[in-house]
């Protein structure tokens, strides 16, 4: 257990940040998963809508520090390419 005020504060901050990061990560993964499922279903309209919802989540993940910007760009690019390939 912490013995200094500053260490106790760091523990409190860590709890809050961990919860926030988990929530952001979960929301991001759900959006990407929904886009992948829509693409796999073969429905172009649903895939475009899911992709449109996933892109801001990926961008928000970069801003909040959950994702590296190149990782988000790569995921967006691959999802977009797969969605556009649907006939």
Image: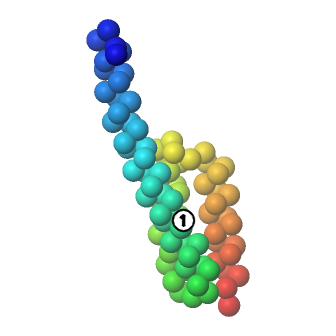
- Figure coloring: rainbow
Which residue is farthest left?
Answer: 5
**Count of picture labels:** 1
Residue highlighted by disc 1: 32
* Residue 79: quarter of image: bottom right
Q: Residue at x 31, y 20 (%)?
A: 9
Which residue is farthest top?
Answer: 4
Q: Is residue 48 among the parts visible in the rendering?
A: no
Q: Residue at x 61, y 87 (%)?
A: 42
User: Relative to 70, is 6 on the left or the right?
Assistant: left
* Residue 22 in picture, x, y percent from top left: 43, 47
* Residue 28 in picture, x, y percent from top left: 48, 58
* Residue 57 in picture, x, y percent from top left: 48, 59
* Nearer-the-camera pick, 21 or 61: 21
Q: Residue at x 33, y 36 (%)?
A: 16
Q: Residue at x 45, y 55 (%)?
A: 26
Q: In the rendered view, tell whether residue 68 sits above or below residue 45.
A: above
User: Relative to 73, is 51 on the left or the right?
Assistant: left
Quarter of the image containing the N terminus?
Answer: top left
* Residue 49 in picture, x, y percent from top left: 49, 78
User: Relative to 69, is 57 on the left or the right?
Assistant: left
Q: Secondary structure at mark 1?
A: helix
Q: In the rendered view, tell whether residue 18 sits above or below residue 28.
A: above
Quarter of the image containing the C terminus?
Answer: bottom right
* Residue 14: quarter of image: top left
Q: Is residue 67 among the parts visible in the rendering?
A: yes
Q: In the rendered view, tell whether residue 43 sits above or below residue 81.
A: below
* Nearer-the-camera pick, 85 or 7: 7
């Amino acid at each position: 257990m912490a013995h200094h005020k500053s260490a106790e504060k760091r523990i409190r901050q860590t709890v809050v940040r961990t919860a926030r990061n988990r929530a952001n990560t979960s929301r991001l993964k759900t959006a990407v998963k929904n886009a992948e499922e829509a693409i796999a279903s073969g429905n172009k309209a649903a895939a475009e809508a899911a992709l449109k919802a996933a892109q801001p989540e990926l961008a928000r993940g970069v801003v909040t520090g959950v994702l590296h910007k190149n990782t988000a760009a790569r995921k967006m690019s691959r999802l977009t390419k797969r969605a556009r390939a649907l006939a």
